Amino acid sequence: MYEIFINYRTGDGDHLAATLDEALRHRFGDDAVFRDGRSIPAGAEYPHELLTRLRRSEVVLAVIGPRWATADELRQEDDWVRRELVEARECRIPVVPVLSDPSVRWLRREQLPPELGWLAELQALRYTPYRSAQDLAVIGDELLDLVPVLDQGGGRPAHEAAPHTSNATTGGRHGTVVQGRDFSGDVAGAIYKGNTGAFNTGPGDQYVNAPRLTGDGATYVAGDNHGGVRHVFERGRDSGRDGTAR
């Protein structure tokens, strides 16, 4: 059974809809979240499937994008975003607006069609991309309070609601690379695998995709040169009497 139904408009909130879908399924389980683009199987009768799943849901998340309230489609009776919200209202299913960006203002009754004016009176949640993990955890917590049955689905706690982040450097590397917090897994193996140049497993410098020149007279110049490059050699080592190389 899908307890959470995600309502969104393609082109104005679908990215957040997909993010919510992934995060909430990771926390509460795959069967807890309905999003039409993923949940309706090929060949299924779209209107019947959509309304059936909506009527069986415990809560509707209405993703509100920057152009959501002013969209012409919202004024049309056959608009599916509108139909889903009206149906949820008639079925007395709680609706939680989720503002998809810091620029999205709270809904006002005067900017909405009369059939949807009630949305302006609902407490909304906000999602901010630069604090994604925190906001997704808050949204999950609020849903858990609203739909306690979600806690029976064997979902993960909020601090495990998103997959762990791993960082790797591939291809070209310029400047200093810093890994924050802890490493996990076979770090040395990941660095060494496929390496064809010098590799150091102990203390000392590690060279990654950068030239290394050693020996007498070795020179390497990177970046702009404004002052000229000059060699000075000791006398008696294949040099002229004035110290310049031959």
Image (cartoon, grey):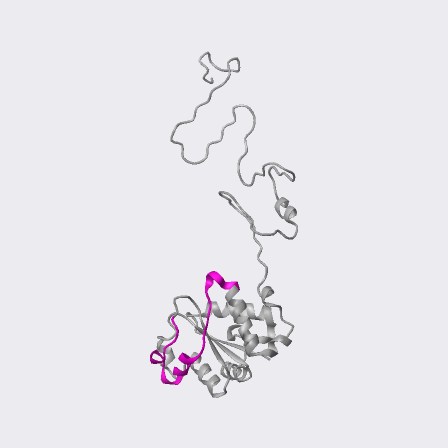
Indicate the position of residue 42 as horizontal and vertical percent values: 55, 76
Residue 87 shown in magenta: no
Q: Is residue 221 in sight in this rendering?
A: yes
Left or right position of 120 against 20: left
Give the residue at the far bottom of this rendering.
90
Q: In which quadrant of the rendered view does residue 44 lie?
A: bottom right
Residue nearest the viewer, comparing 48 with 234: 234
Indicate the position of residue 132 as horizontal and vertical percent values: 50, 63
Residue 126 shown in magenta: yes
Identify the residue at horizontal 36%, vertical 85% (top origin): 114
Identify the residue at horizontal 62%, vertical 75% (top origin): 151
Give the residue at the far left of this rendering.
110
Q: Tally the marks.
A: 0
Identify the residue at horizontal 58%, vertical 52% (top origin): 181
Q: Is residue 32 above or below residue 209?
A: below
Residue nearest the viewer, comparing 209 with 88: 88
Q: Which quadrant of the figure contains the N terminus?
A: bottom right
Q: In which quadrant of the rendered view does residue 229 lie?
A: top left
Left or right position of 34 against 113: right
Tell me which segment is drawn in magenta: 105-133
Q: Is residue 149 above or below residue 222?
A: below
Residue nearest the viewer, comparing 79 with 107: 107
Indicate the position of residue 208 as horizontal and vertical percent values: 56, 41
Indicate the position of residue 192 as horizontal and vertical percent values: 63, 44
Q: Is residue 41 in sight in this rendering?
A: no
